Image (cartoon, coloured by chain):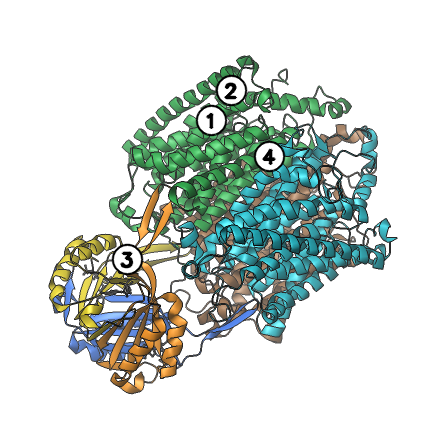
Chain colours: A yellow, B orange, C blue, D cyan, E green, F brown
Amino acid sequence: MKLLIAIIKPFKLDEVREGLSALGVQGITVSEVKGFGRQKGHTELYRGAEYVVDFLPKIKLEIAMDDELVERAIETISSTARTGKFGDGKIFVLPLEQVVRIRTGEADIDAI
Amino acid sequence: MKLLIAIIKPFKLDEVREGLSALGVQGITVSEVKGFGRQKGHTELYRGAEYVVDFLPKIKLEIAMDDELVERAIETISSTARTGKFGDGKIFVLPLEQVVRIRTGEADIDAI
Amino acid sequence: MKLLIAIIKPFKLDEVREGLSALGVQGITVSEVKGFGRQKGHTELYRGAEYVVDFLPKIKLEIAMDDELVERAIETISSTARTGKFGDGKIFVLPLEQVVRIRTGEADIDAI
Amino acid sequence: MLQRPTPPMFTGKHFAVLFTFLLLLPSLALAAPSTPTLNTGDTAWMLVSTALVLMMTIPGVALFYGGMVRRKNLLSVAAATFAITCLVTVLWVVVGYSLAFKGSGAFIGNFSALFLRGIGPDTLTGSIPEMVFMTFQMTFAIITPALIIGSIAERMKFSAMLWFLGLWSLLVYAPIAHMVWGGGWLMGDGVQDFAGGTVVHINAGIAGLIAALMLGKRKGLGVQPMPPVNLAYTMTGAALLWVGWFGFNAGSALGANGTAGMAMAVTQVAAGVAALAWMGAEWALRGKPTLLGMSSGAVAGLVAITPAAGFVGIGGALAIGLLAGLICFWTAVYMKQRLGYDDALDAFGVHAIGGIVGALLTGVFSAVVLGGVGLSSNAHHSILGQLWIQSKGVGFTIIYDAIGTFVILKLVDWAIGLRVTEEDESEGLDITLHGEQIYE
Amino acid sequence: MLQRPTPPMFTGKHFAVLFTFLLLLPSLALAAPSTPTLNTGDTAWMLVSTALVLMMTIPGVALFYGGMVRRKNLLSVAAATFAITCLVTVLWVVVGYSLAFKGSGAFIGNFSALFLRGIGPDTLTGSIPEMVFMTFQMTFAIITPALIIGSIAERMKFSAMLWFLGLWSLLVYAPIAHMVWGGGWLMGDGVQDFAGGTVVHINAGIAGLIAALMLGKRKGLGVQPMPPVNLAYTMTGAALLWVGWFGFNAGSALGANGTAGMAMAVTQVAAGVAALAWMGAEWALRGKPTLLGMSSGAVAGLVAITPAAGFVGIGGALAIGLLAGLICFWTAVYMKQRLGYDDALDAFGVHAIGGIVGALLTGVFSAVVLGGVGLSSNAHHSILGQLWIQSKGVGFTIIYDAIGTFVILKLVDWAIGLRVTEEDESEGLDITLHGEQIYE
Amino acid sequence: MLQRPTPPMFTGKHFAVLFTFLLLLPSLALAAPSTPTLNTGDTAWMLVSTALVLMMTIPGVALFYGGMVRRKNLLSVAAATFAITCLVTVLWVVVGYSLAFKGSGAFIGNFSALFLRGIGPDTLTGSIPEMVFMTFQMTFAIITPALIIGSIAERMKFSAMLWFLGLWSLLVYAPIAHMVWGGGWLMGDGVQDFAGGTVVHINAGIAGLIAALMLGKRKGLGVQPMPPVNLAYTMTGAALLWVGWFGFNAGSALGANGTAGMAMAVTQVAAGVAALAWMGAEWALRGKPTLLGMSSGAVAGLVAITPAAGFVGIGGALAIGLLAGLICFWTAVYMKQRLGYDDALDAFGVHAIGGIVGALLTGVFSAVVLGGVGLSSNAHHSILGQLWIQSKGVGFTIIYDAIGTFVILKLVDWAIGLRVTEEDESEGLDITLHGEQIYE
Ligand SMILES: Nc1ncnc2c1ncn2[C@@H]1O[C@H](COP(=O)(O)OP(=O)(O)O)[C@@H](O)[C@H]1O
Ligand SMILES: Nc1ncnc2c1ncn2[C@@H]1O[C@H](COP(=O)(O)OP(=O)(O)O)[C@@H](O)[C@H]1O
Ligand SMILES: Nc1ncnc2c1ncn2[C@@H]1O[C@H](COP(=O)(O)OP(=O)(O)O)[C@@H](O)[C@H]1O
């Protein structure tokens, strides 16, 4: 099993989620994060102070899945989240050793 | 060492934390996330617009721990976070290669 | 490749980021988390109620990097984030199997 | 003024009115003193006072209470306050005003002014249009049930709340208003209640306590922390209550005169002292002066000076404010914990207790020797005598209110149930009752 | 009063003024009735009304609208409201007031009072200083374009908005104000518009619709959810609008008199009923009573009672409020979806529709048999006759407004473009237009 | 009016008062002009003005400042504002009012009205109850130290703040108020300060600068960004300041008359122009028009028109607003950065600078040739002469204020220390000083 972590642009969330659902992904955990990277930030102004905010709002998805789904999930996320501009984000794949569904106690593949 | 990631219902946080403390867990990192899964969302209404909010508030716990503690931690989290209804959440176990305590520079088991 | 997760004190963020930039790190994902640990919390007062808030605001950094950078990154984070007081935080190192840059489809080292 | 039978009068405001009368003698001498005429200055002030008291409820109470609940219930408290404002507005013009201010029954008015029949732009109450008097009184009828929302917050059904407070406004508020202000027996008895210590605050606070007891505690109380979502809202609400209270208290002079000026000054002083007292007690006993404490103290002082406003001097205001601040601090912070009822936002602890403190002390500090304008002739101008009269007023209000509230709530419980489900309470009333949430 | 040519008069307020006049006869008899004198009570009330109507726009409209947009656009809406307040303030004293209230043209005033030439502290309008009348009218000229911001929210350029609404205030608002209130042909025709149903609300709502159509829909509308960032702000804004509306409607009596009292009472009643109606319809048809619904309903009621305020009785207020609540609910919730224009915050759905409902019903409920003060003599006191006059007023306003708005927007579009780039819209106007954001 | 010795008078308002007097002659002729009588219209307006000025501080200043600090310090700023309101309320009735407005000393009043001894509901000041005058003045005494909080935000101890501002209100504010308004030497000298340019704004701003210098900079200034937590709060605060300023400036006419009307109109105009000027300068020089800029500009305009309000015409208001907006923009945005003091929220940059601009320009635009009501006879009606008198007033205020503030702060520093620990500053004052936080 793998844990996919995807960083995407916020307004792409719905599209990505629909893409993943179509693929059979049944659960996703989402959080609001700030990203620092090649995409350049915006300037904020406060009376005397003016500064560049380098950390831009991003959405982080965490999705546990079976190994065989990984390739297709990466493809789906890539295609739905892509705008072609800086800051589209990344996908990270981590090994996942164990999964438990709290409600039932089911484990691993059954628990995803 | 392992990194446990647990997704639970927000109002269960205090119970889970107490359970883990009883087990000897000394550190936890918590964040607010939104979960999408089998649990059905709620409807929101705004004048002409009505829509289902699929992403429900969840709490994510990240806990680094020694391998031997993992089984008992899973049990504790499962029993304290369970309500038996959809949406109780998941526990993910990831391999953890290295831990450093910033304050002292201690590493691995000593650093947890 | 590794995924470094660092938990630090919020007001150290800028220093740490600058340190990592100097090292050649080009991307970081940041989130606001709450930490529970050895550092003692503060007390809040609300009319009849007084309680200790154990969860303190922390910043979590996630940084994907090449294996060879890991050591120096740990050193940089440790030295810039250290105050010497409880609560300075932790660094966790996780194995990272795959990375994809959504914008270009580049993979692994090229995608970081 | 006692010779003019038509306009409703505030016997509680006997002295204040006499005073004003004497003050206005020269100008009245110019006009025809026998037929009441509209005074534009008085009317201007009462139009404004009406706006100010409405502002106390929306957005005042809505923000004051809204900021104190948990994030998931913020909108539900605001919605309850807003809906009650609208509901009582309608009930009042349909029947409430008539029940409270028409007829000469000892306990309740009559139905002669249903739908405000007979009141037009030219009907006067004293020197102001009766429509202004009616709307001014409406804002009091609105804020009183709105205050009760503090006791029932975070767990009552919206529908049950509407039924409860709607019925309460007709069956409890209107009669008490009639008895104290509209010509009923407490008015004749000599009770001094300048702007509503009994009618508004004790009344709301006791109903709140009964409702809190019947509803039971919020799930998790004492186990989970229940931090207020945004004390900046609460401070804003407290500040708007304070500013609006000038209309509440100084407006109760029913004119722009020396009594109104005096009422405004003592209102300001009592609020300030009470806030400092609560803050000081908190600082000494619990280590830190909080914004919630100051805001609560200010409201406690405003509540306590309400019955006294037109009657007492600056010394009285300082004393009443100080005592109200300390006593309400103790009630809300210590007594509540000890007794264990869940008066969520302290409608009882601040409004009933502050109201009782104020109503009794009005009987003390109205005395001329203590800088007041004088005690009721029914009390033979003795402090003990006035205290006895005040106690009767307070006691009767408490008993009538408690019974009335209990009966209404039993009825509503039987018909539709009072409390939301456990799950809805967990998830929060904003989403489950109203389908909305704060996104910021 | 028709003999005194100098002070601007509200022909729409003919009856109200006559009424007041009769009411004041005794006091006027004491003073010299031939030369107008300043009445301090009237002046006090108008000073306050001016403050209240300003409060409706800032912070009222700014919060009401600001809470309804997405988080990333909150400040942009507040900034637009604030900037328009400032811009119209200047335009009004430089030329707007003169265009609206000076001279006797059928369609527009003249330039005789540029920079308020000739108006000093001692110039009177009726019984109040003309400076007060001018500032009171300025607050109306401010809120009208501010309401339009609701239709164009979340996608218009700030610079284009300033040009559009600045020009609109001179080329559309000022002429219509002149025609209805300043001595123009609609005033002579007998249109009853007590406080601005046509001039303010229909005018703003139609301009909003045209602008929404010309701008096009927000990106993602109907696909992505667009949840309001903070309905506590919206509730606060609605409440301040409500409180401020007392100045708007009762202030339009231009004095502290029985008409003002009546106007205040019916304003309160219509707002309450309309909020309950919208909330009830929502509850019945969509399952839950929302805070946004109540707030919207209250505003709809306030809009609809605006033209009627000084003319109708309590029965009329109940009827107007009920109908406005239900009809505007239907417009904003159902009709908008069906027709598909993106009137983001329903300036058209609430203000134009509510204004039309109110303007027409004013012609019905002003009738003496229905509890009102009477219909215009031009209508031979017949309801049908008055309805016809009202319809002409409404119809003319709609046509003139729609054409004027269209032309101005075409011009601005041609000169600098109306809409922000797609990227700016995605990222949010707070950052991209103003370089600021909410951090909480 | 100089023959009547009892009521406190505003010599600065000499012309305004004369004007009003002439205006009221006909009505005064009817009453007995020799004995002052209560005017209900004037009283109504002053009751309202008092409420409006209180609203400027709570919630006005609390929200204006609260929104500008970092999230962790929001409540601490609100708490400071609220606590100062309460503290000054008590100090004022105990001794402050007497020091400022009783007796004929050149520099300070006397103790004759401790605890407001001798002032009852029937005591008049001009045509209004003295209690109303006293409470109106109290709200000025409250807002002045509250403004100073802007300079010391995010780093001063709560206890030190209370001692500092409490002492300051008695040792600095009361004497200056006496000198300019209460019969002291500056009043005799012919200084024109209609509503408090020197007494309130320059006074607060200079004290703020001294305090900012003595406290030192906030940790991390210039290194870490310090984004304002919620500019919607700041906008709301600015709007409430604006609305409340009608009470501040038009209320300073002490009656509902033509001068009040004029003061209100020029207040509105100056605020609008100054906001546009600041916004325009920002747009041109820094690329974007911000909501914070508009709000700051409006306040700058309101500050600058304060001393001029009853004296200048529309032309003067436009000029004063324009200059105040531009100059304060430059001070707050450029000069502060260059000089490097940490006047956190620009109490100095906006209030002192705006106040100085206004105080000097009052000496120019009051001239009849420039549309004003006329210059002081002490200045032989020459602009240069009046400028010299104004400069003396400004200069003396600055010097006295700077020295007084310095001494008080040294004392408080020596006794309990001024600044929180570095750690508390890092963690934020909300938690460390008040044990509370915003949870939203
Ligand atoms: N090495 C990294 N480790 C963690 N997160 C990263 C890393 N590089 C980029 N990110 C995340 O991905 C986002 C997009 O990256 P960026 O470099 O701006 O553009 P692009 O993905 O188009 O190359 C960043 O905002 C950040 O959240
Ligand atoms: N495959 C998954 N990957 C990541 N998070 C998941 C996954 N499945 C579920 N979750 C998280 O667990 C939460 C609960 O899952 P859900 O399917 O609603 O109920 P249950 O855990 O009872 O089966 C979700 O809200 C989501 O946050
Ligand atoms: N075992 C753990 N698993 C996950 N996070 C931890 C763990 N231990 C500590 N943390 C995180 O690190 C932060 C600092 O830890 P703490 O024990 O307070 O101080 P120190 O790092 O100085 O020992 C905590 O607030 C928490 O967020």
| Residue indicated by mark 2 | E191
Q: CA distance from mark 4 to mark 1?
A: 19 Å
Label 2 and label 4: CA atoms lie apart by 21 Å
* Kind of element beneath mark 1: helix
Quarter location, residue B60 = bottom left
Query: Dot 1 corresponds to which residue?
Result: E198
Q: Which mark is residue C93?
A: none
The three-letter amino acid code for the residue at tag 3 is: Gly
Residues tagged by mark 4 and mark 3 found on one chain of the structure: no
Labels 4 and 1: the sequence-earlier one: 1
1 and 2 marks in contact (CB < 8 Å)? yes
Q: Earlier in the sequence, mark 1 or mark 2?
A: 2
Q: Quarter-wise, where is residue A91 in the image?
A: bottom left
Q: Please give left or right for residue F371 compared with residue C62 in the image.
A: right
Query: Secondary structure under badge 3?
Result: loop
Mark 3, residue position: A41
Left or right: E67, with D15 as reference point: left
Circles 3 and 1: CB atoms closer than 8 Å = no
Q: CA distance from mark 3 to mark 1?
A: 46 Å
At which x and y percent is residue D327?
A: 68, 65
For mark 4, name the chain: E
